[in-house]
Image (spheres, grey):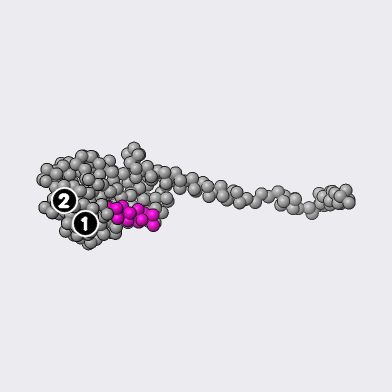
Amino acid sequence: MTFLRFFCFFCLISLAFAHEAFDSHLLLKPLVLEVPESGENQLKEVDGEIRLRCDSWRFNVEANNLNPWRTIPKNCTEYVKQYVTGRAYQLELKIASNEAGIFAKSVKLVGDGKDVWIFDIDETLLSNLPYYTEHGYGSEGFKADEFDSWVQMGTAPAIQPSLELYKELLDLGFKVVLLTGRSEYQREATTQNLINAGFNDWDRLILRRDDDHGKPAVLYKSEKRSEMENEGFRIIGNSGDQWSDLLGTSISIRSFKLPNPMYYIS
């Protein structure tokens, strides 16, 4: 019976090849390879590999392990976009501010008005995400003139967890000092932006003067903190999105690093 089936099949094949109207594509159909499920999974693995590498890159950014960098990796643009516009970024901001608040409440203030908490401004109190949305989320090189124009608009929104911490610190009796890399000529726009975003009652707003330009941020901010200590202030806490906000000399008792994978300032 098996031999008979094989013989009939062989005859049919022979007739098919002999027929003038034979469509040669008929016999190719069984040989067309469909994309197997394993192939689809392989594509997902490539996406997963990019995400894994970008996760690792961002971790090392936040751990201050990387050498100075100018732009985010090109293949991480979509990753950074999803991160800074998603829930993870908001949760990490919230955790950092919550932990700062827990620490602040544990401190027994002297009560002489000399206990200080320092805040950076950009990506710490105010978010420049609307600007970076239009500039590749950090994938483009920094353009000082365009960023200055954005600052002068004075429309940066508050980072909500930082605003809540800011108000809590004032209620606890801390003096709040704003120490920013922005320039003195941006004082009016910066002041109005902060007020409009809900920040009030800071003790002082320190911006770069002419003789501060050209200094690395870590040196500039160290000098300003040293000046405060020389005035008798005790720097209890410091919140910033860059390690250069927090490191150097005359550092605070506790520092709180907010996430920022979009740019690096040394």
Task: Give the number of the disc on residue 221.
Answer: none
Residue 212, by quadrant, is top left
Badge 2 crowding class, 10 Å Cα cut-off, few under 14, some 14 to 19, many 20 or more, is: many
Question: How far from the left and from the top, in percent, is residue 217?
Answer: 23, 42
Mark yes or no: residue 71 visible.
no
Residue carrying label 1: 169
Q: Residue at x 22, y 49 (%)?
A: 237
What amino acid is found at the position of numbered circle 2 in the picture?
Asp
Question: How far from the left and from the top, in percent, is residue 230?
Answer: 12, 43
Relative side of 141 to 209, left or right: right
Question: How far from the left and from the top, in percent, is residue 10?
Answer: 84, 48
Mark yes or no: residue 249 visible.
yes
**Which quarter shows the C terminus?**
top left
Q: Nearer the viewer, residue 103 or 231?
A: 103
What amino acid is found at the position of numbered circle 1 in the picture?
Leu
Residue carrying label 2: 115
Instruction: Answer above or below: position of 108 versus 248.
Output: below
What's the magenta region? 87-100
Whole-angstrom CA distance, mark 2 to mark 1, is 11 Å
